[in-house]
Image: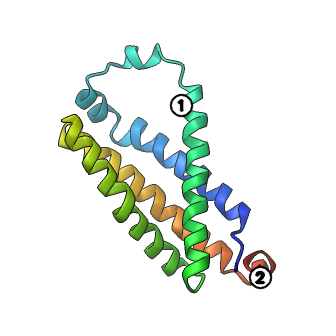
Amino acid sequence: MRRVNIWAVLVSAVVFWLVGGLWYRLLFGQRWMAVVGKTEAQLKAINPIPNYVLAFVLEIVIAGAIGWVTSHTGELNVKRGIRVALGMWLAFVATTFAINYGFEGAPLALYWITLGQYLVGMLLSGTIVGAWTSSAGNSRAARA
């Protein structure tokens, strides 16, 4: 069995978290607010710290799972990390969100905005974990 490099997981989680910030602040924030029916003032009235902390913790879990599956199912490299992340996104995220959003009657635009952020975040996590765990200097962390 191989171990996942914890530094790769933590860096992946930070990158994933930053993607979320950029996604909703710069890229799709206005569209997202319109789709969910919120205003900037309404969002500022909510303390975001607990949500930011929870998001980061859960992104550590996601990055760790990508790393674990990558390291336990084949060669450790960027291509494999990306393939694993894409497969996990398709199998678990896209499908689960489709079920939930369908039953909730949520707008399709909300589904695509949310799904896109997870796709980019997970692909970057797969890239980082795959690259980091496959580096020559990390041979000890990649072994069990």
- Residue 57: x, y in percent? 61, 44
The residue indicated by pointer 1 is 51
- Whether residue 63 is visible here, answered yes or no, is yes
Q: Would you identify the image quadrant in which residue 56 lies?
A: top right
Q: Which residue corresponds to the image point at 55% horizontal and 81% vertical from the top-left?
A: 73
Compared with 111, 39 (above or below) is: above
Instruction: Specify which label sits upstream in the sequence, 2 or 1.
Output: 1
Res. 139 mark: 2
Estimate how packed mark 1 is, as few (under 14), some (14 to 19) or many (20 or more) residues with alpha carbons within 10 Å: few
Compared with 128, 59 (above or below) is: above
Q: Would you identify the image quadrant in which residue 95 lies?
A: bottom left
- Residue 133: x, y in percent? 67, 75
- Whether residue 128 is visible here, answered yes or no, is no
* Horizontal relation, residue 121 to residue 108: left or right: right
Q: Which residue corresponds to the image point at 26% horizontal and 50% vertical from the top-left?
A: 98
Compared with 67, 92 (above or below) is: above
CA–CA distance in space, label 2 to label 1: 36 Å
Q: Which residue corresponds to the image point at 27% horizontal and 28% vertical from the top-left?
A: 36
Amino acid type shown at disc 1: Asn
